[in-house]
């Protein structure tokens, strides 16, 4: 692909399936279109694909290191487990209800998204430590942001630490845990006049008032949460805030690693993946691509792909939507239902069935369903391959997102 005119003539075709994709959010489509124009403006197809491949690798290697600190008993380990989609009794979970005996940070890797790491930091505890020496001890520069956990009130240790973190130009957020227990107690105390929203608002205001006294400039935001139920209270707002505050690659990792606690999370993950799969499609169609055997539309209309890249990516999608075997088993245990019952509501195959042969079969199936588009691109190997792969991946992601919703609904269904 050499001349600019040739490139331009190819562009609308290669972008066609993206723009025609009916469940594509228009903002994502525009964004992809702009990125497309950008990568193709000064290089050919192969070079563009190789640039995108580097970008994908950078994304895969992007780590997110989240520091979680606060006094013993404030609920740090429980929050870390909740963020990893685990209960304390699951394998690899942080032990809950134990007093820390070490001052060393302990790392907990996300089981489905190992580049996301949660660091359980001991609270400052002793007044012998200044916030600055504490931050030095826990290796301050390694973290992307800090969550300071407190139950009831935040102590001067916590606010002093937040000030030191802000001074060193990093973000920190206050998280007040165990809100479920406070609400439960208040409801028992005021059985006739209890109003959940009013109690929560009063808790937020009291904390803000307390913090206002300690901070001269920006007061870190406070979020009321229960690690037992992330869908409730301020956790969704914490997600929105981090989504805004994190830069693109870190944001990507954060959103894809979120536990599946609500339909909004499923939607977010679907959007992130939908804005990413054109890259997988382009790389798969251009780099290490080999011919698809048994193309029903004959050998003079070839199609090529890197089926192994597609297979790996599709397996990752299962993990992102918590539809892999381990995640389903955990959910089934929590729901006290046989895992078969959850698997039965999935329309996609189980993750173990996603082999290279399966991928090739899927592509052949899409050549047939998108026959018209395919035939319109005859003679343009990359454009045709890209389009078919893109359509296949896009549908695959939508189907998994629907399965994830069905599985969650089934898990929450009361026993008959
Ligand atoms: N009700 C309720 N209890 C919690 C919550 N988070 C933690 N706990 C309880 O608080 C205690 C201390 O929790 P843990 O996570 O071990 O705190 P850490 O010492 O800061 O790691 C344990 O008994 C937990 O079960 C929560 O959100 N709600
Ligand atoms: Mg702990």
Image: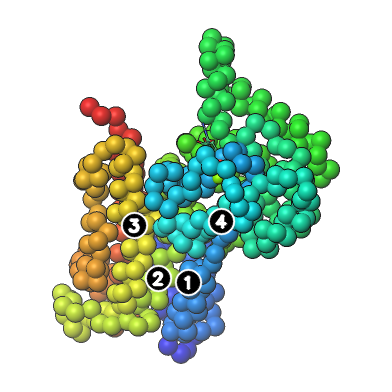
Q: Earlier in the sequence, mark 3 or mark 1?
A: 1
- Of circles 4 and 3, the one toward us is 4
Separation of marks 3 and 2 at Cα, in angstroms? 16 Å
Identify the residue under disc 1.
56
Q: Which mark is residue 318?
A: 3
Q: Earlier in the sequence, mark 4 or mark 3?
A: 4
Image quarter (top left, top right, bottom left or bottom right) of the N terminus: bottom left
Q: Residue at x 73, y 37 (%)?
A: 155
Separation of marks 4 and 3 at Cα, in angstroms? 28 Å
Identify the residue under disc 4.
106
For the residues labelled 3 and 2, say whether their Cβ atoms are less than 8 Å apart: no
Question: Between 72 and 279, which is closer to the camera in this rendering?
Answer: 72
Residue 19 occupies quadrant: bottom left
- Relative horizontal placement of residue 399, taking residue 101 as reference (left or right): left
Separation of marks 2 and 4 at Cα, in angstroms? 34 Å
Q: Earlier in the sequence, mark 2 or mark 1?
A: 1
Label 1 environment density (alpha carbons within 10 Å; few <14, some 14–19, many ≥20): some
- Of circles 4 and 1, the one toward us is 4
Separation of marks 2 and 1 at Cα, in angstroms? 8 Å
> Residue 178 in the image: x percent, y percent?
56, 33
Q: Earlier in the sequence, mark 3 or mark 2?
A: 2
Q: Earlier in the sequence, mark 4 or mark 1?
A: 1
- Relative horizontal placement of residue 27, taking residue 101 as reference (left or right): left
- Of circles 2 and 1, the one toward us is 1
- Of circles 2 and 4, the one toward us is 4
In terms of secondary structure, where does tag 2 sit?
helix
Label 4 environment density (alpha carbons within 10 Å; few <14, some 14–19, many ≥20): some
Residue 380 occupies quadrant: bottom left
Q: Residue furthest right?
A: 216
Identify the residue under disc 2.
280
Image quarter (top left, top right, bottom left or bottom right) of the C terminus: top left
Q: Residue at x 21, y 45 (%)?
A: 340
């Amino acid at each position: 692909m050499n001349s600019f005119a040739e490139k331009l003539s190819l562009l609308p075709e290669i972008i066609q399936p993206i723009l025609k994709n009916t469940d594509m959010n228009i903002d994502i489509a525009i964004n992809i279109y702009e990125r497309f124009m950008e990568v193709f403006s000064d290089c050919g197809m192969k070079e563009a694909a190789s640039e995108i491949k580097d970008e994908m690798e950078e994304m895969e290697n992007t780590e997110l290191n989240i520091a979680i600190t606060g006094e013993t008993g404030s609920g740090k380990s429980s929050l870390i487990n909740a963020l990893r989609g685990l209960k304390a009794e699951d394998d690899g979970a942080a032990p809950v209800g134990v007093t820390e005996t070490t001052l060393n940070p302990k790392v907990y890797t996300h089981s489905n998204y190992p580049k996301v790491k949660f660091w359980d930091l001991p609270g400052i505890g002793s007044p012998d430590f200044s916030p600055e020496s504490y931050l030095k001890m826990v290796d301050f520069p390694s973290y992307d942001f800090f969550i300071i956990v407190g139950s009831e009130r935040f102590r001067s240790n916590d606010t002093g630490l937040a000030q030191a973190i802000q001074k060193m130009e990093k973000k920190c957020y206050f998280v007040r845990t165990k809100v479920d227990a406070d609400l439960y107690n208040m409801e028992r105390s005021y059985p006739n006049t209890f109003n959940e929203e009013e109690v929560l608002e009063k808790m937020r205001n009291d904390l803000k008032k307390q913090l206002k006294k300690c901070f001269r400039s920006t007061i870190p935001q406070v979020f009321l949460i229960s690690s037992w139920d992330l869908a409730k209270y301020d956790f969704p707002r914490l997600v929105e805030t981090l989504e805004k505050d994190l830069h693109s690659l870190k944001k990507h990792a954060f959103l894809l690693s979120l536990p599946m606690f609500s339909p909004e999370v499923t939607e977010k993950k679907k959007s992130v993946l939908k804005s990413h799969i054109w890259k997988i499609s382009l790389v798969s169609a251009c780099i290490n691509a080999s011919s698809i055997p048994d193309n029903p539309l004959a050998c003079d209309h070839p199609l090529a792909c890197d089926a192994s890249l597609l297979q790996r990516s599709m397996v990752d999608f299962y993990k992102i939507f918590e539809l892999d075997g381990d995640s389903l088993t955990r959910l089934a245990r929590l729901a006290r239902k046989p895992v078969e019952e959850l698997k039965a509501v999935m329309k996609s195959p189980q993750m173990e069935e996603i082999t290279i042969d399966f991928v090739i079969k899927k592509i052949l199936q899409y050549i047939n369903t998108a026959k018209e588009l395919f035939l319109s691109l005859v003679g343009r190997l990359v454009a045709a391959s890209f389009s078919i792969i893109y359509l296949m991946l896009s549908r695959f992601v939508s189907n998994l997102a629907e399965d994830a919703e069905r599985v969650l609904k089934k898990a929450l269904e009361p026993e008959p």
